[in-house]
Amino acid sequence: MVETAPPTPPPEPLDRLRRGPLELLGRIVDSSNGTFLASVGEVDDEPRPTTDGDPDPVADIAAEVCVEPESGDGWDEDDPDRGGDDADPDEDTTTASLPPGLKGVYKPLAGERPLWDFPEGLYRREIAAYELSVALGWDCIPGTVERDDALGVGSLQRFVEADFSRHYFVLRDEGRYDDQLLRMGLFDILANNTDRKGGHVLIDADDHIWGIDNGLCFSTEARLRTVIWDFAGDPIPDELMDAVATLLDRGLPTALTDLLREEEIELLLRRARMVRHAGQMPHDPTGRAIPWPLV
């Protein structure tokens, strides 16, 4: 392992994510649920609009933006041909570039598809994943808050500016980020992530690695599915073990437990105790505990 310590990112702009005005830029393509890219303005004192009882607010958003943090496709905001081989560089299109400034990924409850194995409200799990990363002191999940805006209540997560072609498998092969990738793998074990694809692991311009798309965490079944199995059998570094021990000794914060059911809380604590006892990264005895597609 080359890296001695993950870089420390700046504080998350949580207040701005909670209260800054949103401008929806469009729906992110290939998302399984209604997921929207939004520009987040500076905080002011004006009240934010809500759905006001609109039965299907998501249906009114037709535009799509060609950024795919959930599928791993890259984009280049300076490339006029990003919209396709025949794209007109003078054409005004949302696929050509993204605006500067803070952006967020907005996942409203109204855009969720019902699942048989998870209760309604996946957006709460997005927030819970962030709160777990905060409780552990790991800074591995972008700032994520609850937001009730034009499309109703949901989660708003800071959009990570990244080269989306550098997903988990690329970063693994580069061999410079083992510490951070192992930490992400351990986080997924604690959160019981059932869908950690390679494209859900991003790296920013400061070489800090982030995990996105965490809505399928905290399952009450033992259904860990992740691409991060390369560290199986490796000892868990002392600083990560200390963070798990501290979490158990202090207990889970209410900012996290308020988002989960009682059984989910108990199983999270049980997984933390198992990690503390084992002291090493687990193996996949089935060889099938991976999501599909991989990226």
Image: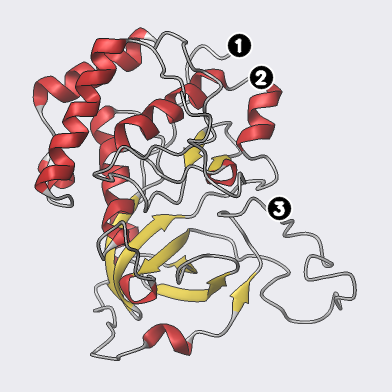
Q: CA distance from mark 2 to mark 1?
A: 8 Å
Quadrant of res 123: bottom left
Which SS class for mark 3?
loop
Which SS class for mark 2?
loop
Amino acid type shown at disc 1:
Val
Q: Is residue 182 left or right of residue 260?
A: right
Amino acid type shown at disc 3:
Gly
The residue under label 2 is 175
Q: Image point 77% across, 59% down: which residue?
A: 78
Q: Is residue 247 left or right of residue 153?
A: left
**Marks 3 and 2 in Cβ contact (< 8 Å):** no
The residue under label 1 is 2
Q: Is residue 97 left or right of residue 288?
A: right
Q: CA distance from mark 1 to mark 3?
A: 26 Å
Quadrant of res 279: top left
Nearer the observer: mark 2 or 1; the answer is 2
Q: Where 87 falls versus 235 (above or below)? A: below
Q: Image point 33% across, 46% down: which residue?
A: 217
The residue under label 3 is 74
Q: Image point 74% across, 56% down: which residue?
A: 76
Q: Is residue 231 left or right of residue 248?
A: right
* Residue 249 drawn at (x, y percent): 11, 20
* Residue 163 drawn at (x, y percent): 67, 46
Q: Which mark is residue 152?
A: none
* Residue 115 drawn at (x, y percent): 35, 64
| N-terminal label among 2 and 1 | 1
**Marks 2 and 1 in Cβ contact (< 8 Å):** yes
Q: CA distance from mark 3 to mark 2?
A: 21 Å
| N-terminal label among 3 and 2 | 3
In the image, 20 versus 158, the foreground residue is 158
